[in-house]
Image (cartoon, helix red, strand yellow):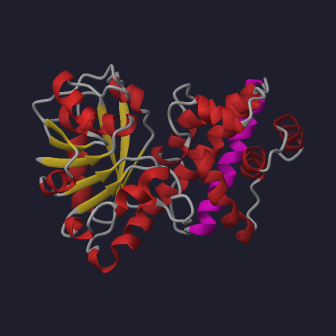
Amino acid sequence: MLKNVTVIGSGSWATALVKLFSDNGTKVAWLVRNKEQAEFIKTNGHNPRYLSFAILNMELIQATTNVQKAIDQSGLIVFAVPSAYFKKTVEQIDPELLVDKQLAVSIKGFIPGTGFTPSLFLQKYLGKKADTKIMVMGGPCHAEEVANQKSTYITISAEDSKWVDKVCKSLKSNYTHAIANNDPIGIEYASIIKNIIGISTGIANGLHYGDNFQAVLVSNAMREAARFLNAVDPRKRDLFHSAYFGDLLVTAYSDFSRNRTLGKLVGRGIHVNKALQAMEMIAEGFHASKELAPFQAKSKIKMPVINAVHRILHQHANPYHEFKLLENQLT
């Protein structure tokens, strides 16, 4: 079990991770965005903007804006920022500070403009200074349910089984179960696909399709996810494990899903730009669908659901017409 961990990020999921670690007795150095937020957390015991109802154990949590101070305190550094901000966040950290640290990413999406998953981007940034493989923390889990202490399963994936075991033990609590996994890249790619699929089910809901159609939509999308994973990272894996299709299902059907929410708004006729502005939090699937397009075009993988979402979000296609065409492609 870990004695100390550093969490980098100020949003809902970073807050949830801080709660998960501290609830199980691990001391957390929490690197947040600004001094006002850090002082508010220290004084009030909760995040002022995200998951503000979650009560945090401040005896084990130190909120700070000092990068070196936060990183020096821990052997495990967890990045939990939206993919859109990850590049900027990483580039503000001296690579030397991360030498000899175990690094983990808990981010679901491509890094915009790079085509890299978070772990691959971090490895590229650090270059030869990275002596360790990057750990990936996956779902299925919504931050809101962590805050409410609902029974939650979180997946810890890395090639180093000893570190996986340490982190799993540090996340177990009376409401948390940690699942060990050794397929970090596969989990990252699966999480990218599932966010786009979440948008598709939201669009279907916004267009007033029923449960029958949505069930067929998701089952077809699962096959697309399997084809994509087998093409970009071929290896033996059981996609019915929680970190793959379990995470997909919770994103596709939960009202907590930001991606499903974005899809609902777009399906109801709201322009995607206005829908994004109306949301307080980032729907990772929006950027992911754009970054995924070159992969799909190059490999020519059959992905009608994913392609329909891309055309709706980024090529101004009419959602109603796209889904009418999609109806004839589903089996």
Q: Is residue 167 visible?
A: yes
Q: Residue at x 34, y 64 (%)?
A: 134
Q: Residue 247 or 92: which is nearer the viewer? A: 92
Q: Residue 172 or 127: which is nearer the viewer? A: 127
The percent coordinates of residue 135 (x first, y second) are 33, 59
Say if the magenta span includes residue 166.
no
Left or right: 249, with 36 as reference point: right
Q: Residue at x 60, y 46 (%)?
A: 285
Q: Residue at x 14, y 41 (%)?
A: 26
The percent coordinates of residue 169 (x first, y second) are 20, 45
Give residue 145's quadrant in the image. Answer: top left
Which secondary structure class fits the magenta region best?
Answer: helix
Left or right: 256, with 17 as reference point: right
- Residue lying at the far bottom in this picture: please name it: 128
The percent coordinates of residue 17 (x first, y second) are 30, 39
- The stretch in magenta equals 210-232
Q: Residue at x 23, y 32 (%)?
A: 173
